[in-house]
Image: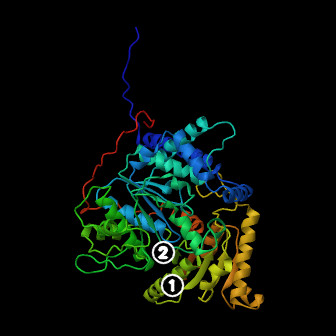
Amino acid sequence: MLRIVQSSIRLTPFGVALQQRQACSTMDFKYKRAIEALNSLQSSQASLEQRRAERHARPERGLLQTTACLRHLGLTQQHLRRLRVIHVAGTKGKGSTCALTESLLRHHGYRTGFFSSPHLVAARERIRVGGQPISEQEFASYFWEVFDRLEQALDDGEQMPMYFMFLTLMSLYVFVREQVDVAVIEVGIGGAYDCTNVIRYPSVCGITFLDYDHVDTLGSRIEQIAEQKAGIVKPGSPILSVPELTEYRAEDGRRPGLAMAGPHQRQNAALALQLARYWRATAGNDTSDPCPALDAIASGVCRPAGDSDTLPRAPPFPLTPLETQALAECRWPGRCQKVSRGPVTYYLDGAHTRGSVELAAHWFQSEAARDAALTGRVPRRVLLFYSTGSREPSSLLEPLASLRWDHVIFCPSVVWPVVDTSSDQANCTVTPQSRQCRVGAHFTAWRELTSSDPADTAAGAVGGQLHRLACISQAVELIEQCGDTPTQVLTVGSLHLVGGLLSIIDPELRSAMPAPVTAGARPRRRLASGTAPAGGLLV
């Protein structure tokens, strides 16, 4: 007779730990497979050149492909309209503006979605829900849902969407599935033909400061760049911008503190405050605080063309304690950020236009002098620099050439000498030879800016001792061979360079992740979101 005996065996702590490690290992494998598949969607350098030529001939091609892929995923404009999108374009500050806007709405109890680019350490940073990047498990799960559905739906000869387009589609898919109340969407490049511009009914749009960047794609004149950025404007959707600094103060008259350093962040905060107030008063159905932007738009934006050359101006307003808290608790890594490792302090800013590099240099000078005064010792100063694309090295380096440096390091924005295709940091679009050519261009530009005698510059007499390295990990090893000597390192020129450095010195981004919303925030709101997804499909 067969007897069934219930086992009384219990897992020891070691057994539980082993199970947890196996589960983590399985999840880690799934995530790495997803990242490897995502990296396979990166274009080669030759493909990028071909696509750039095609974009000049048919600039709408990317938007048409994105629209077709939305249909394959079962996403309609009705789904996107329920996301109540805040769409933000601009050259400088659009990421910071989006982060501040998201923080303001999250602190008011809304479930937020936030899509940004590029990522610093992990690709999942680009897609945030409730202020936090989606988990590795969520990323892998959603990635394969989107990837498999697109792969099955594509006709013969159709290509899978490229890296950025895929992540744009995935973010919209995630936000619909997660039923967020609001989606804050940062434009990638330009606006008019950016694949985020599939959003036809944004609740409100914002345009940040304009500058010269991506001129090979957007044009070499500021009017051409402005036209591209303004392409996100839609009939019936208001557009807000901040042409000059607007001062905001709390109800007690004090200027609110920002966690993000730099005076330019006050301009980004001004735009974010107006965007958030307008969205709350309209799409968010919140009339608890007055909305000057809404009043100004209602009174002036519909005037016939030529009736006035002055756009309606939304006046400043006193900030509520909750708005002050949201600004103070917002974190946006890689922008005017400091990370300390022993005697070394890294000053990080992903500035990649001349104007933004000038701001970063000013911030570094101020912070470094203050920090040096606290130690009472003269620090060793290091510049770590790299710029990507077609940006002119001498233009970016000139604002830095007049500062005192003991060492100047040029290296590509890759973490290790050999690219790991399952790494979030992998860049398969540029060959190693091209990277080293770029490093050489920086090296030459720096010598021309700092000395007429290359031998003097190489010896460190003027402009610091120069180093050409193969990767970021080599730069960190060189920098941290300093014993107990205080060392200040400005890292600037590329967000990819900053991200690669952070993957070594702060891989979890603990120094810059937004904290959970603390006491004082409004309770969770719930807006009607229409038909919910069922059974893993969008209906």
Residue at image position (56%, 79%) is 357
Picture layout, residue 446 above or below residue 131: below
Q: Is residue 167 left or right of residue 440?
A: left
2 or 1: tag closer to the N-terminus: 2
Q: Secondary structure at mark 1?
A: helix
Look at 29% across and 68% down and name the residue there.
Answer: 295
Instruction: Give whichever of 124, 356 is nearer the camera.
Output: 356
- Mark 1 is on which residue type? His
Answer yes or no: do the residues labelled 2 and 1 have beta carbons within 8 Å?
no
The crowding category of the residue bearing disc 2, from other C-alpha atoms within 10 Å (few below 14, some 14 to 19, many at least 20), is many
Residue in view at x 60 percent, y 58 percent: 425
Q: Is residue 293 left or right of residue 475?
A: left
List x then y, in percent, for residue 113: 41, 54
User: Image quarter for residue 10?
Assistant: top left
Q: In front: 216, or 259?
A: 216
Coloring basis for residues? rainbow
Q: In which quadrant is the C terminus drawn? A: top left
Q: Which mark is residue 362?
A: 1
The span from disc 2 to disc 1 (Cα, nearest Å) is 11 Å
Instruction: Indicate the quadrant containing the N terminus: top left, top right, bottom left or bottom right.
Output: top left
Residue neighbourhood size for the residue with mark 1, other residues' Cα within 10 Å, grouped as few (<14), some (14–19), many (≥20): some
Q: Which mark is residue 336?
A: 2
Indicate left or right for 485 with 432 as reference: left
